[in-house]
Amino acid sequence: MNKQLRKAIIAGNWKMNKTPAETKSLLTEIAPLVKDADCDVIACVPYVDLTTAIDATQGTNIKIGAENCHWAESGAFTGEISAKMLASMGLEYVIIGHSERRQYFGETDVTVNKRTRAALDAGLNVILCVGELLEQREQGVTAELVAMQTKIALNGVSKDELKKIIIAYEPVWAIGTGKTATADQANEVCAVIRKVIADVYDKAAADTMTVQYGGSMNDGNADELLGKPDVDGGLIGGAALVAEKFAAIVKAASK
Ligand code: PGA
């Protein structure tokens, strides 16, 4: 982390976990543990938990986000939720382009770009996920692939709008597998992403861009990962569902 230049942000990605009642209880447990955080703390929760999550975190430093949004404002898209609907609830954040969306729900770089555009238009902050598959890492194309994903996702996003974007580097082989990228591997790709921002926009934009790492980050490895200069926070899956573990990661980011 380089807190002189940019914000450290720890975000939970709850995925398809927790009922509203469980959401209330987990957030009530987390809130006192993270109240003195010296980083931004976000919990991205399932759609049906959003109202409960917003209510449960009133007056705390925890911000709430959704896990996806559609690119249209409204219309015949059964089962989808628009960015405008999310913003109207008072939400501030949305995850876009998570690898599980790409892997299981046909999300492409182009739809990631459309959703990003829609989220920005609705006034939301976007946690934009990029990352390579294991075979792509083994083929030596990680840097090119992540650069391409980043560029396409940000197509049509102005330099000013970039302030509302957080990029999460999540190597797909490290998500939910217990296999964390080494701190050096994470830092290397976060630096690649920063270089892309510098090339497409400018150095000032790159310097202030928060680039998170995600993929089996936990209370045991957060210190080392967050100790790297280009790793500005984490997008946390499994460990975000356990209050003490999530709080320990927030603590590591508060140093
Ligand atoms: P994980 O998930 O921490 O369980 O690996 C991270 C993510 O998918 O955002």
Image (tube, helix red, strand yellow):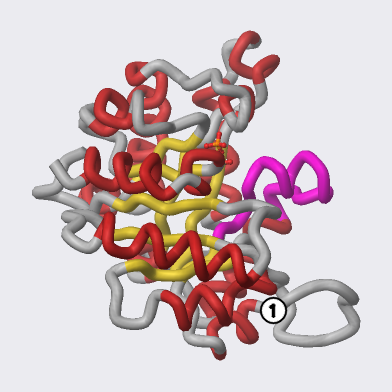
Residue, x 27% and y 62% (percent of image)? 32
Residue, x 33% and y 17% (percent of image)? 184
* Residue 173 visible in this rendered orientation of the protein: yes
Residue 27: % across, % down: 44, 64
Q: Above or below — where is 39 with respect to 186? A: below
Magenta span: 95-110
Is 91 covered by the magenta stretch? no
Residue, x 23% and y 55% (percent of image)? 39
* Residue 68 visible in this rendered orientation of the protein: no
Residue 251: % across, % down: 23, 44
Looking at the image, the residue that sits furthest to the bottom is 88
Horizontal side of residue 105 vs 249, given as left or right: right
Q: Nearer the viewer, residue 208 or 59?
A: 59
Q: Nearer the viewer, residue 247 or 122?
A: 247
Can you say which quadrant of the picture contains the C terminus? top left
Residue, x 62% and y 9% (percent of image)? 138
Horizontal side of residue 23 vs 249, given as left or right: right
For ligand 1, the image quadrant comes to: top right
Q: Nearer the viewer, residue 47 or 142?
A: 47
Is 108 covered by the magenta stretch? yes
Q: Which residue is mark 1?
A: 82
Q: How many marks?
A: 1
